[in-house]
Image (spheres, rainbow, N blue to C red):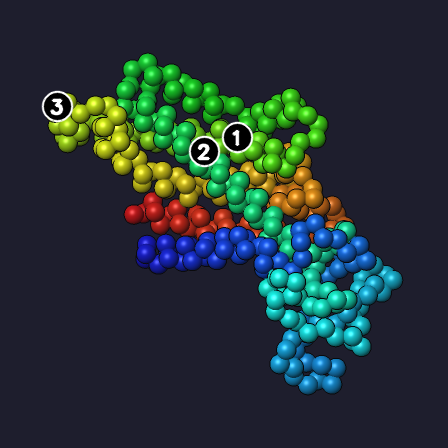
Amino acid sequence: MSRRIKIALALAALGLLHAAIALAGWLAPYGFAEQRREYPYAPPTKVHFTDRAGHFQLRPFVYAIEPDGEGSYREDRTRAFPLRLGVRGRLFGVDEPGVIFPLGTDSVGRDVFSRLLYGGRVSLLTGLAATLLSLALGVAFGVFAGYFGGWPDRLLMRGAELAMALPWLYLLLAVRAFLPLHITTLQAFALLIAIIGGIGWVRPARLVRGVVLSGRERGYVEAARGFGASHAYLIRRHILPMTFPVALTQATVLIPQYVLAEVALSFLGLGVSEPVPSWGNMLAEASQYHAIVSHAWMLAPGLALAPVLLGYLLLADALEER
């Protein structure tokens, strides 16, 4: 497979995924906190195209569901609800009292598909924001250390080695211990970005430093310096553009890593908490044995991670080849 095809496929897949998550408020049939307690652990709703007599219907429909008294559900085939577009300002849905759960429900009757889309906003935005923070710090420190050298270089590189040695999970636990017991969703989100992004600047900084050490000795940089160009001009005009390919490649590598970090931290209860969904705290409920055995649809957030990670890794591989 050629490099261009790889990049095109990765960008198309990532574009569709990010667009779907960004449009969660329109694509999701329900709100992320909307509960229907009469339907705990309801299985994914079956969409039908043929009626009870076997006749094909142009408009797909769903049957009403009701508990069977044995912990499962059965369809009530005397009540059918056609699938409609533009229901309650959302892309699709059914009229009340019908319900549609494309990926089933959780323990309190919340639609897993809707929460998956809304939760992707938290997980992906954390990865993107933490990557921007890491790259901003990494490029700034790497350029400063590589361009000026001397004691700034030694100080920053020793600081980088110290940051690499710090266990970021324990650091997050220590920071969390100093905060109030109950923090808002926004505070938890900011904490995740600060810790993940603040620790991750080391690798980009070391790579950028290597590029700058080589670039500052190039002929056109030396010529500009000989004509009296200032440090600010040389960095802005000649040095920074050299770092852009490294920063772009690092972004495609760091984003999936940071998305996984958010999922892991929220799974452990250190990230965004209920009722706001993220893929991590959704998987926390799926960690219960009965949920995995009897309600496999609760693992949907874990499956959603696969195309996101593969898309970014494919893009990173193509950019590294280039």
Write down the residue under mark 2.
Answer: 133
Question: In the displayed image of the protein, which residue is found farthest to the front?
Answer: 89
Question: In the displayed image of the protein, which residue is found farthest to the right?
Answer: 69
Please provide percent x and percent y for residue 320: 34, 45
At numbered mark 1, what does the secondary structure look like: helix, strand or loop? helix
Q: Which mark is residue 56?
A: none
At numbered mark 2, what does the secondary structure look like: helix, strand or loop? helix
Quote the CA–CA distance across marks 3 and 1. 41 Å
Q: Is residue 214 above or below residue 318?
A: above
Tell me what residue is drawn at x 54 percent, y 53 percent: 21
Callout 2 amino acid: Leu
Q: Are marks 2 and 1 in contact (CB under 8 Å)?
A: yes
Q: Which sits in the foreground, 154 or 120?
A: 120
Structural crowding at the residue carrying mark 2, measured as other residues with C-alpha within 10 Å and reported as few (<14), some (14–19) or many (≥20): some
Callout 1 amino acid: Ala
First of labels 2, 3 by sequence position: 2
Callout 3 amino acid: Gly
Tell me what residue is drawn at x 62 percent, y 62 percent: 89
Quote the CA–CA distance across marks 2 and 1. 8 Å
Task: Identify the image quadrant of residue 87.
Answer: bottom right
Q: Which sits in the foreground, 230 or 310?
A: 230
